[in-house]
């Protein structure tokens, strides 16, 4: 407990900033921006967990022993998952922006509290 | 070093959420993304850093194109009191739950001991990746060989999301 | 855009194309791969689009052609996966070359190429959809 990781805590604060934006803002574009910040924080947290101190990148160089490489490189699985997550995030943002543009064409505003048909 | 850039990231995120102008909010979001790319270089992840920089550039172009010529000012009027209270309560509850989980996490930078059940396949990939797949970039080996079904699903999701955007934005006859 | 932007774009375009293709073909030896290469190639066309205006860019790369490439990339990924599953070449290879050489890795370089086509066409299609459709509607 004496060496509570500061980086983990900061990533979680970033996630909380995004959460506040999603709940409390009423501009549609601001909500999309907050969701992007949350996604950034989660990707960062996954990469932080896979870090090894004084490690090397998981790309082998010619003439390197496999066992020596395996004892030095950082986590490759976390990086692969984060690449997939980033590209999926881009396509989902495109879909969200398309919906926001359609809503703007219909209501002439980005204000979500003025969109009467969306009220439950 | 990483913590310093993270402080900068948090400040940029707060500016992006609280600024009055929508265009400056988008630019601040770009600052958040590029800071993440710098952190990835420090974390020994060159593959992910390349993808993050490119995605951020495309994202900014798309966001600016989408909000251009629309009203860029922030909206007047306050949110309801109940919603604001609910937001603060949600963030507080989130921190209570997270503090309990963060204590049990190991020290930053000790990868193989991070989470016992997760680190076993990673070490297997590192030790046997070159012999089994014949390629030296282990990240690509995981992406396209060991966990290839993830990539198949990812490509399908990309395809259907683009199809959805095209269908939503098509012209009315 | 102004004349400076057009000139710089025409000078830089070839270098961007070479870099994008390099990063795909060496994706199994160095950092990079299908996702990064596809994004670079799509960004080349986005640059063309922004510098020269949409009419000239669409004339050079028609929209139905992009859509066809998108389908071809998806089809290629599916076919290569089915091939890989049914013939069991995930571990073994079509050509098991020397390690650390360009022609090695079996199914992975073709799969990289298919992902490259899919991602490049897809991202550019997102951009064209979001910009072309709304500008025709505002008029």
Image: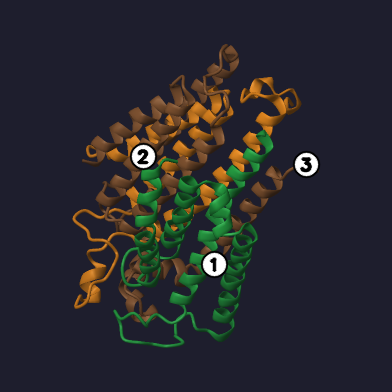
Chain colours: A orange, B brown, C green
Screen quadrant of the N terminus of chain C: top left
- Distance, label 1 to label 3, CA atoms, is 38 Å
Q: In this view, does B78 lie above or below B42?
A: above
Write down the chain letter for disc 2: B
Q: What distance separates the C-alpha of mark 2 from that of mark 1?
A: 31 Å
Q: Is residue C99 above or below residue C53?
A: below
Chain for disc number 1 = B
Q: Which label sits in the foreground, 1 or 3?
A: 3
What element does badge 3 sit on? Answer: loop
Q: Which residue lies at the image location 52% right of the left edge and 70% below the top edge? A: C114
Of the numbered discs in the image, which one, if any, rests on residue B172?
3
- Marks 1/3 same chain: yes
Does dot 2 land on a helix, a strand or a loop?
helix
Identify the residue at image location x=51%, y=42%: B62
User: Which chain hosts label 3?
Assistant: B
Q: Nearer the viewer, mark 2 or mark 1?
A: 1
Q: Return the residue at label 2.
A: B102
Comes first in the chain, label 2 or label 1? 2
- As drawn, the label of residue B149 is 1
Q: Which of marks 3 and 2 is in front?
A: 3
Earlier sequence position, callout 3 versus callout 2: 2
Residue neighbourhood size for the residue with mark 1, other residues' Cα within 10 Å, grouped as few (<14), some (14–19), many (≥20): few
SS type, badge 1: helix
Where, by quadrant of the figure, is residue C100 drawn? bottom left
- Horizontal arrangement in the rendering, residue C111 relative to residue A101 (left or right): left
Horizontal side, residue C80 vs residue A79: left or right: right
Report, in whole angstroms, how far the alpha carbon at label 3 lies from the one at label 2: 52 Å
Residue nearest the viewer, comparing C117 with C8: C8
Of mark 1 and mark 3, the one earlier in the sequence is 1
Q: In this view, does C2 lie above or below B28?
A: below
Neighbour tally class for label 2: few under 14, some 14-19, many 20 plus, Cα within 10 Å: some
């Amino acid at each position: 407990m004496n060496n509570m990781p500061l980086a983990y805590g900061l990533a979680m604060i970033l996630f909380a900033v995004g959460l506040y934006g999603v709940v409390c803002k009423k501009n549609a574009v601001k909500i999309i921006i907050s969701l992007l910040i949350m996604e950034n924080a989660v990707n960062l947290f996954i990469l932080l967990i896979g870090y090894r101190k004084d490690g090397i990148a998981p790309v082998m160089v010619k003439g390197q022993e496999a066992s020596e490489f395996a004892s030095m490189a950082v986590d490759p699985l976390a990086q692969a998952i984060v690449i997939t997550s980033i590209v999926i995030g881009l396509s989902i943002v495109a879909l969200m922006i398309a919906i926001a543009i359609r809503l703007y064409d219909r209501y002439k505003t980005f204000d979500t509290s003025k969109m009467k048909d969306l009220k439950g | 070093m990483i913590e310093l850039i993270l402080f900068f990231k948090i400040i940029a995120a707060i500016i992006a959420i609280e600024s009055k102008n929508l265009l400056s909010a988008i630019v601040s979001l770009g600052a958040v993304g590029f800071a993440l790319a710098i952190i990835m270089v420090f974390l020994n992840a060159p593959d992910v850093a390349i993808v993050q920089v490119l995605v951020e550039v495309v994202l900014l172009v798309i966001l600016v194109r989408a909000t251009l010529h629309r009203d860029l000012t922030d909206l007047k009027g306050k949110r309801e009191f109940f919603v604001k209270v609910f937001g603060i309560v949600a963030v507080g509850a989130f921190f209570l739950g997270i503090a309990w989980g963060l204590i049990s996490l190991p020290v930053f930078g000790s990868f193989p001991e991070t989470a016992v059940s997760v680190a076993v396949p990673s070490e297997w990939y590192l030790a046997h990746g070159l012999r089994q797949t014949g390629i030296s970039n282990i990240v690509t080996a995981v992406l396209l060989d060991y966990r290839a079904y993830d990539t198949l699903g990812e490509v399908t999701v990309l395809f259907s999301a683009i199809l959805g955007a095209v269908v939503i934005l098509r012209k009315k006859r | 855009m102004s004349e400076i932007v057009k000139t710089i774009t025409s000078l830089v375009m070839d270098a961007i194309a070479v870099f994008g293709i390099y990063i795909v073909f060496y994706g199994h030896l160095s950092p990079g791969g299908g996702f990064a290469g596809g994004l670079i190639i799509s960004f080349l066309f986005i640059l063309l689009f922004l510098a020269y205006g949409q009419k000239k860019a669409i004339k050079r790369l028609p929209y139905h052609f992009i859509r066809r490439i998108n389908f071809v990339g998806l089809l290629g990924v599916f076919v290569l996966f089915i091939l890989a599953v049914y013939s069991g070449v995930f571990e073994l290879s079509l050509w098991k070359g020397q390690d650390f050489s360009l022609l090695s890795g079996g199914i992975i370089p073709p799969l990289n190429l298919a992902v490259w086509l899919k991602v490049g066409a897809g991202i550019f299609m997102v951009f064209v959809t979001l910009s072309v459709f709304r500008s025709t509607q505002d008029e």
